Image (spheres, rainbow, N blue to C red):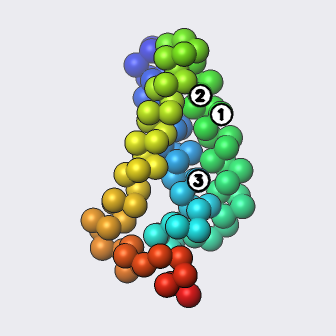
Amino acid sequence: MNTWLSILAFTLAVSSAVAFYAASPHCMWAVLRSRWRFARSAGMLLALLSLTVWVSVIGVVVGLCAMLLSWMSALVAQPCLALLTGTPDAGATVPERG
């Protein structure tokens, strides 16, 4: 049971990171750039759900660390994935896109 809850918590953290990345002006995927307000709200809700599940599975301190580790890993991986997949805007900064 704890394995499935841990997988759920990790999935919620990654989904939250994707939603926050979609709400960011630095998002390199055009598909994710629309509806940024909804993405920000969904990201916050998913982060709180992930934190709640992690804490219920492994405790408060370790759950907070596990949530932040999975969340930040997903946030760091997204620009790298955009560069690897060959997104046209991946090398441009926000002002360069126009």
Can residue 11 be seen by looking at this rendering?
no
Quadrant of the image containing the C terminus: bottom right
Dot 1: within a 10 Å radius of its alpha carbon, few (fewer than 14), some, or many (20 or more) residues?
some
Q: In which quarter of the image is the N terminus?
A: top left
Mark 1 lies on a secondary structure that is helix
On screen, 19 above or below 53?
below
Residue 72 pos. (x, y %)? 46, 42
Q: Contact, CB < 8 Å: mark 2 with mark 1? A: yes
Q: Earlier in the sequence, mark 3 or mark 2?
A: 3
Compared with residue 68, is residue 84 higher up or lower down, i.e. above or below?
Answer: below
- For mark 2, give the secondary structure: helix
User: Decide: marks 3, 1 in contact (CB < 8 A)?
Assistant: no
Q: What residue type is labelled 1?
A: Leu
Residue drawn at (59%, 62%), measured in percent from left and top? 24
**Comes first in the chain, label 3 or label 1:** 3
Up-down: is 33 above or below 10?
below
Instruction: Report the residue marked by disc 3.
Output: 20
Residue 63: percent from left, percent from top: 52, 20
Spatial separation of the CA atoms under disc 2 and disc 1: 5 Å
Residue 48 is marked as 1
